[in-house]
Image: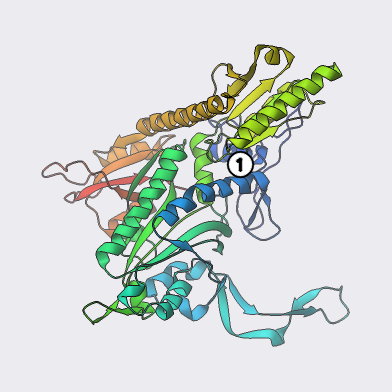
Amino acid sequence: MQRAKKAKKDKDGGVAVTEKKGPKDGMISITPRSEDYNQWYLDVIDAADLVDEAPVRGCKILKPDGFAIWESIQRLLDPKIKKMGVRNAYFPLLIPVEFLSKEAKHVEGFAKECAVVTHHRLRAKTGDGPPGVEVDPESQLAEPYVIRPTSETVVWNMYAKWIRSYQDLPMKMNQWVNVMRWELKTRPFLRSAEFLWQEGHTAHATKEEADAQARQTLDYYVELAQDELAMPLVPGRKSENERFAGADETYTIEVLAQDGKAIQGGTSHFLGQNFGKAFEVTFDSEDQTVEYVWGTSWGVSTRLIGAVIMSHSDDDGLVLPPALAATQVVIVPMFVKDEEKQATVTAAAEKLRDQLDEAGLRVHVDLRFKMKPGQKYYEWERKGVPLRLELGPRDLDNGVAFAKMRTGGDKFNINLGDNAASEVKESLEKVRQTLRERAEEYKKRLTVEISSREEFDERLAARETGLMYVPWGGDNDDEDKIQEDTGATLRCYPFEQKPMPDGQLCPLTGKPAREWAIFAKAY
């Protein structure tokens, strides 16, 4: 294998995908994960042809196979959102600057990341220089707009108009949109200036109902990420320092990557009455009093795709849980010199495809007969297709197709006929179960309980830091100091808390421990 090259930096300082060619097959080589994890991640994405660099600073283009993964997330999550009584809507991309200033913590949290629109027209360049366009100075807007970094402000502005009585509550809306945060350093899926997400916004009559909504949403995120996407994670509550800007509580799922770092996979925020008060969203209660509403907001983004890649992929390329894969099954009919036999094999492959398609599976038949079978297998493995079926004349005579799972193991047979779809579905479920078991195994291996500062520092110096459970007793300043000194952050207070021993002191601060916290290095 060709030695991997170092990742190139794009113009904005972010990491760009580096194209490398293998010495024989003309395909992009993948840096071994153990050699350079960051480059391995970029190579896996590049080899699977998921993204490309956009001509706009810090932005990425999601190519069809990359966008298909996001479509799968939408397909899996949207019914769960609707199950909570939430309806999809759409709010505008541009938000008046003044809206962000209404909630103090919110503007403080997002001001440095906002892209601002100040003019509404271009004009042809004047003068003797080369032709082109420039901003028309006479088109300056009366007030500037920000491209939404998130939509709480515009949503709550409208909720003030739509909510009058307790009978209007709860009001629950969600949107699947793009947002922009002017990130200085970018990484495909994990961090880019523009990204896709869903963002839910709800208003409630009581604190208890709003908090329950935020927790229920996180439960659905856990169900999606842990059960269907097979990722190793810990659900919990963010520290005050790590909360969403303008929230009273932030609930999170922290995903563990294979290199021992954490990735915030999704968050759900209990907003209290902060946005209700900032935007004067009140309602007439059943007791005929005027009350401020209680709010939540919550979302997952294309960042979840990066977490999936880092959770499951290997040195051969992309590995995807079947629920996400753009192509769940690829059928590879073998090349046969005899034209009549070739037609029979091709027809059988297409018939099998139709059976699987009718069963709701995403299937592709690879009819590139001029390409060697080994090259095809190599390509589909790198693209993360969970199941490959091979079909030749002898297989047809035996009434079977050879099958191979992306998660490894020996080849096995899928019986052709009426039960083919059910056997394929069973195989795909085995892929999911295998990924789940592997994820839990490395989560167990990379989870440690810290009893001293020396142990904490030793773990941070190790190649794989992992999730460090600490009996925590520090305050916000202590947390900031640890992050400044070590680069580790308090990821969350896990929901599952084992009893704290009497008299337990925090090994990082020496103060009485209050609850268990997870520290880790993070993306």
Residue that mark 1 sits on: 42
Where's residue 494, x and y in %?
A: 29, 46
Position of 26 with respect to 353 (left or right) is: right
Q: Residue at x 75, y 27 (%)?
A: 23
Is residue 110 in view from this perspective?
yes
Where's residue 2, x and y in %?
A: 70, 29
Q: Looking at the rendering, which quadrant does residue 57 occupy?
A: bottom right
Q: Is residue 269 above or below residue 318?
A: below
Where's residue 436, x and y in %?
A: 43, 32
Is residue 101 in view from this perspective?
no
Q: In the rendered view, how is the structure colored?
A: rainbow
**Residue type for callout 1:** Leu
Residue found at the far left of this picture: 502
Q: How many marks?
A: 1
Q: Residues within 10 Å of mark 1 (few under 14, many from 20)?
A: many
Q: Is residue 265 above or below residue 357?
A: below
Q: Residue at x 38, y 38 (%)?
A: 466
Q: Closer to the camera, 67 or 359?
A: 359
SS of the residue under disc 1: helix
Where's residue 233, x and y in %?
A: 39, 41
Q: Is residue 434 above or below residue 298?
A: above
Q: Closer to the camera, 66 or 505?
A: 66
Position of 5 with respect to 386 (left or right) is: right
- Name the quarter where the N terminus is drawn: top right
Residue found at the far right of this picture: 128
Position of 365 with respect to 234 (left or right) is: right
